[in-house]
Image (tube, grey):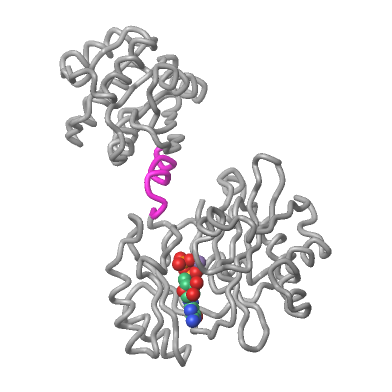
């Protein structure tokens, strides 16, 4: 789960990382008031669950309340990478001497948290990683204790030649590692970390991704969820009790049971196709769940065909069939739908689908997957 910059700053601040006081507002008039209350020049910042806001015009400097209102008006009209801007953070503007990148992530390959630092912050760290990987320094740290002081100093000296300043960065890195661990995060990032004219270090931006399994266990983290649902389709899936993970391919899969979903994706790959997602609609699925699943899949513009693979144990095939028919009535799906239904009330399910003419029926899993792969590749005409 993603949290907003202002929430991440609050958490980092509680761990002793220096952040500026800011105000969260929803309207341009409120932005004006916030700027007046803060005094001096401010920065107006879009609060959306995506990076690269600066490049997209979502971060604007304003000399005072009037300009803050004007900039807020502009930013509130934006949709950044599909995320409409509904909230703004108004924060005092600072003079920057240098921008660094610091971030803790979970290194899944080595099964350890990893601290990454670079002297070249502010810009896309992915670009630095791709073009000049030698400018990023990494060190694993202990998942119980966090980054040790000596490790922090080692990293800090790599990005800051001045000894006293490096020590300031080292202190911050230890705090960041502790904030990362305490929040059960998969990512805790400050980009840019800035050195101000007075030699202090400040988290000008803050990014925190929380582990969904940790959020499920902790009320304090759940409370950080944005009720506006700006998490998009993953949020919608959660609301309907669906496990949904978007992928890169073009075959939208709707399956009941995680194991069958994995097997279906394997089979899609086996026959030369590419799954667009993992989607487990779970047991005892109601038509409403199927409608939600279809809405989520059709919102992904890469999807060219929808493949249902349902084993009806607790899930009744006739319910799934009703869901497909209902969804088609509600959403005008133009994509071909291939269905393999087997198990409880299979015959009735097939009848419902055949009556509506909504889907292409397949008798076996192999047949269904092969049909879907052919349809996605455009080598078979719908019908
Ligand atoms: P991002 O684009 O989503 O990563 O948003 P950031 O919060 O990192 O802001 C992008 C860039 O705007 C930063 O790298 C800074 O260069 C600039 N910026 C943000 N706040 C300030 C500020 O208070 N003063 C100055 N001079 N620049 C700022
Ligand atoms: Mn940033």
Which region of the structure is painted magenta?
Answer: 229-240
Residue at 32% from the left image edge and 35% from the top image edge: 297
Quadrant assignment for the C terminus: top left
Residue at 35% from the left image edge and 61% from the top image edge: 80
Q: Nearer the viewer, residue 207 or 87?
A: 207
Residue at 42% from the left image edge and 51% from the top image edge: 231
Judge whether 341 appears above or below 171 on screen.
above
Inspect this view and state whether residue 276 appears: yes
Inspect this view and state whether residue 319 appears: no
Q: Is residue 185 located in the magenta-colored stretch of the structure?
A: no
**Location of residue 321 in the rendering, given as x and y in whole percent from the top left corner:** 27, 20
Q: How many marks?
A: 0
On the rendered structure, is 271 left or right of 17? left
Judge whether 264 appears above or below 102 on screen.
above
On the rendered structure, is 124 left or right of 349? right
Q: Quadrant of residue 154?
A: bottom right
On the rendered structure, is 155 left or right of 34? right
**Location of residue 184 in the rendering, given as x and y in whole percent from the top left corner:** 65, 52
Residue at 23% from the left image edge and 31% from the top image edge: 327
**Location of residue 145 in the rendering, given as x and y in whole percent from the top left corner:** 80, 55
On the rendered structure, is 170 left or right of 43? right
Q: Nearer the viewer, residue 119 or 183?
A: 119
Q: Nearer the viewer, residue 358 or 162?
A: 162
Judge whether 319 appears above or below 135 on screen.
above
């Amino acid at each position: 789960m993603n949290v907003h910059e202002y929430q991440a700053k609050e958490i980092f601040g509680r761990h002793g990382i220096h952040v500026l006081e800011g105000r969260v507002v929803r309207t341009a008039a409120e932005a004006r008031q916030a700027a007046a209350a803060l005094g001096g020049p401010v920065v107006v910042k879009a609060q959306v669950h995506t990076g690269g806001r600066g490049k997209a015009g979502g971060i604007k400097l304003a000399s005072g309340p009037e300009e803050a209102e004007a900039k807020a008006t502009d930013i509130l009209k934006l949709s950044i990478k599909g995320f409409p801007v509904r909230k703004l953070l108004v924060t005092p503007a600072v003079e920057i001497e240098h921008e660094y990148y610091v971030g803790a992530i979970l290194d899944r390959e080595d099964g350890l948290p990893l601290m990454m630092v670079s002297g070249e912050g502010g810009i896309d760290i992915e670009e630095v990683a791709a073009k000049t990987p030698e400018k990023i320094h990494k060190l694993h740290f202990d998942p119980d204790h966090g980054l040790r002081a000596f490790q922090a100093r080692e990293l800090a000296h790599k990005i800051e030649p001045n000894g006293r300043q490096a020590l300031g960065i080292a202190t911050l890195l230890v705090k960041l590692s502790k904030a990362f661990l305490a929040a059960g995060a998969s990512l805790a990032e400050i980009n840019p970390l800035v050195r101000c004219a007075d030699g202090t270090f400040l988290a000008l931006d803050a990014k925190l991704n929380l582990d969904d399994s940790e959020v499920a266990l902790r009320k304090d983290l759940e409370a950080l969820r944005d009720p506006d649902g700006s998490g998009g389709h993953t949020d919608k899936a959660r609301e309907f009790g669906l496990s949904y993970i978007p992928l890169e391919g073009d075959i939208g899969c709707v399956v009941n049971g995680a194991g069958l979903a994995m097997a279906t994706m394997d089979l899609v790959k086996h026959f030369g196709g590419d799954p667009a997602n993992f989607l487990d609609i779970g047991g005892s699925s109601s038509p409403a769940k199927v409608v939600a699943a279809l809405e989520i899949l059709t919102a992904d513009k890469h999807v060219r065909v929808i493949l249902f693979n349902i084993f009806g144990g607790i899930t009744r095939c006739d319910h799934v069939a009703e869901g497909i028919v209902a969804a088609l009535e509600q959403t005008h799906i133009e994509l071909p739908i291939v269905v393999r239904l087997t198990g409880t009330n299979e015959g009735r399910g097939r009848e419902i689908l055949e009556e509506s003419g909504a889907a292409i029926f397949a008798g076996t899993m192999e047949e269904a997957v092969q049909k879907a792969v052919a349809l996605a590749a455009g080598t078979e005409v719908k019908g």
